[in-house]
Amino acid sequence: MTAVLEIEGLRKTYRTLRRGPRQALDGFDMVVEAGQVHGFLGPNGSGKTTTLRTLLGLIRPNGGRMRILGHEMPGSSPR
């Protein structure tokens, strides 16, 4: 099958004044093949919203690669 979403080694660290750096994502990997359905479940602070925001190009990750339909994200997000 063809992968419609590929995430490899996604990392995101937020810098806070009070608590110092906070790692929201640490090497997250995910592949969604055509025809599959996935849901994001997890406790508060587990990285669900951060993952979606990086896919949409709203925030920049510190590392990793993301592809939607074979297009590198967030560089191809206007297309």
Image (spheres, rainbow, N blue to C red):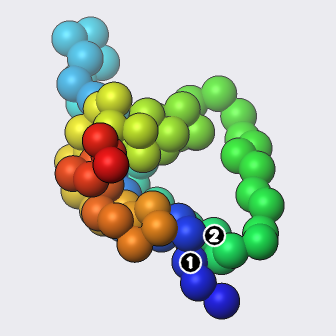
Which label belongs to residue 41? none
Q: Position of residue 54 (x, y in %)?
A: 38, 41
Q: Relative to 68, is 3 above or below?
A: below
Q: Which of the two discs, 1 and 2, labels the residue nearer the N terminus?
A: 1
Q: Quadrant of residue 78?
A: top left
SS assignment at label 2: strand
Q: Relative to 18, is 63 above or below?
A: below
- What amino acid type is highlighted by mark number 2? Val
How busy is the neighbourhood of tag 1: few (under 14 within 10 Å), some, or many (20 plus)?
A: some
Which label belongs to residue 32? 2
Q: Residue visible at 56% across and 77% down?
A: 3
- Left or right: where does residue 60 sit relative to residue 58? left
Q: Quadrant of residue 56?
A: top left
Instruction: Using the rendered image of the protein, determine whether residue 18 is visible from the camera's viewpoint.
Output: yes
Q: Which residue is mark 1?
A: 3
- Residue extending furthest bottom? 1
Q: Residue visible at 59% across and 84% down?
A: 2
Front in this rendered view, residue 30 or 55: 55
Front in this rendered view, residue 34 or 19: 34
- What amino acid type is highlighted by mark number 1? Ala
Q: Residue visible at 76% across and 50% down?
A: 39
Instruction: Using the rendered image of the protein, determine whether residue 12 is visible from the camera's viewpoint.
Output: no
Q: Residue visible at 75% across and 57% down?
A: 38
Mark 1–mark 2 Cα distance, whole angstroms, equals 6 Å
Q: Relative to 13, is 18 above or below?
A: above
Q: Position of residue 20 (x, y in %)?
A: 23, 23
SS assignment at label 1: strand
Q: Position of residue 68 (x, y in %)?
A: 45, 62
- Residue extending furthest front? 79
How busy is the neighbourhood of tag 2: few (under 14 within 10 Å), some, or many (20 plus)?
A: some
Pointer 1 with pointer 2, Cβ within 8 A: yes
